[in-house]
Structure formats: C-alpha cells, structure tokens
Image (cartoon, helix red, strand yellow):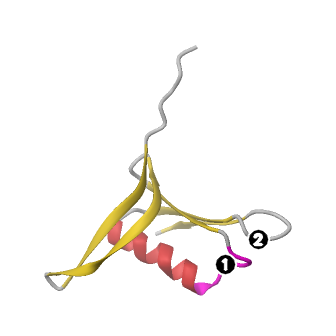
Amino acid sequence: MEARRIPFVAEEELAIEYKGVTLRKKYRVDFICYGQILIELKSIERLSNIEIAQILNYMKITKMRVGLLINFGARPKLEWKRYVI
C-alpha cells in the first residue's frame, strides 16, 4: 500500500495590507491544510467571540472559505466549530 502525503503549511505568516499600506504586524495562522482549510488551535477554558472574530478575519484575509476553530482546553471534551464563508 502506498503512503499518501497530506500537504499542510504550519504557521503561515500573513502580511496585512489596508488601503494600499502594508501593516507592520504579522499574523500567524496555526495551519493551512490542502491550501484551502484554515485551522486555528486554542487551549482555553471556553471559546469566546474574540476567537471567532480572529478566525473569521484570518479567513477574509486569506480568502479561504473554510475554517476550523479547535479548542483543546474545554472540559469535559474537545470543543470545535466549522466556519464557511
């Protein structure tokens, strides 16, 4: 059986351009899988609107339509949300 390679890029760095000016701050996406799926990982007690806004902004910046927000810190089980824009 042949092994299949799963392409992904860890910590994709995003330079933000606003009204023709490149902003100095760089944003880092945790993972981009298959060049189409943005994945943001968290380890916090509970997801809030801040984390949701973060992944939606990253999706808009990268022009990616699918995003996964995964929280490993939630108890008693994993918390995750899928976003499609």
Q: Residue furthest top?
A: 1
Q: Please tell me whether residue 46 belongs to the stretch shown in magenta.
A: yes
Name the one closer to the observer, 46 or 64: 46
Q: Is residue 75 left or right of residue 17?
A: right
x, y percent for residue 20? 13, 81
Looking at the image, is 8 positioned above or below residue 39? above
Q: Is residue 31 left or right of residue 24?
A: right
Instruction: Please state the extent of the stretch shown in magenta in the rendering.
Output: 44-49
Q: Residue at x 50, y 82 (%)?
A: 53
Q: Residue at x 66, y 69 (%)?
A: 43
CB under 8 Å between callouts 1 and 2? yes
Disc ID at residue 1: none
Badge 1: residue crowd in 10 Å (few <14, some 14–19, many ≥20): some
> Which residue is the site of mark 1?
47
Q: Earlier in the sequence, mark 1 or mark 2?
A: 1
Looking at the image, is 31 positioned above or below residue 63? above
Looking at the image, is 4 positioned above or below residue 73? above
Q: Quadrant of residue 28?
A: bottom left
Label 1 to label 2, Cα distance in Å? 8 Å
- Name the secondary structure under disc 1: loop
Q: Is residue 12 left or right of residue 37?
A: left
Q: Residue at x 64, y 84 (%)?
A: 48
Q: Residue at x 23, y 81 (%)?
A: 23
> Which residue is the site of mark 2?
74
x, y percent for residue 41? 58, 64
Badge 2: residue crowd in 10 Å (few <14, some 14–19, many ≥20): some
